[in-house]
Amino acid sequence: MGEVIEFIPKAERERVRLIREARAIYDSIFPPADPVGTQKAAPASRVVNGATIRRSDERLS
């Protein structure tokens, strides 16, 4: 006893199914570049319009 049964309308189940399907399609086209739980190091510098942009915490060599 004490169990709660929740009835979910068919329209809500269909909405959730469509969202899952859309996410799967999106992930197949644009796979996540960074797996969950891992971090990439930010680039130390990059070139923008011919000028080198450096991070403020980067040491100059």
Image: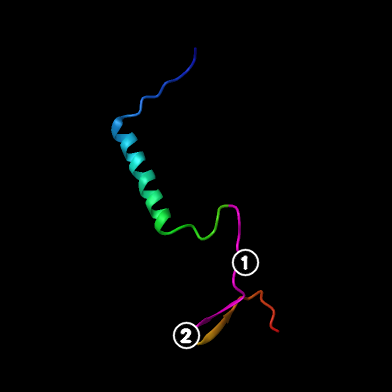
Q: Residue at x 55, y 55 (%)?
A: 35
In the displayed structure, would residue 26 be above or below residue 9? below
Left or right of 56, for residue 34: left
Q: Is residue 32 magenta?
A: no
Is residue 19 or residue 25 the one in the foreground? Answer: 25
Q: Position of residue 44 (x, y in %)?
A: 62, 75
**Circle 1 SS class:** loop
Is residue 44 or residue 36 the one in the foreground? Answer: 36
Disc 2 residue type (three-letter): Asn
Q: Position of residue 16 (x, y in %)?
A: 36, 39
Q: Residue at x 54, y 59 (%)?
A: 34
Is residue 7 or residue 14 the one in the foreground? Answer: 14
In the rendered image, the residue lying farthest to the top is 1
Q: Residues within 10 Å of mark 2 (few under 14, many from 20)?
A: few
Q: Which residue is mark 2?
A: 49
Q: Position of residue 40 (x, y in %)?
A: 60, 63
Left or right of 27, for residue 61: right
Q: Residue at x 70, y 84 (%)?
A: 61
Q: Residues within 10 Å of mark 1 (few under 14, many from 20)?
A: few
Q: Residue at x 47, y 85 (%)?
A: 49
- Alpha carbon distance from label 2 to label 1: 23 Å
Q: Position of residue 21 (x, y in %)?
A: 36, 45
Q: Which residues are magenta?
A: 37-48
Q: Which residue is mark 1?
A: 41
In the rendered image, the residue lying farthest to the left is 11
Q: Report the number of discs.
A: 2
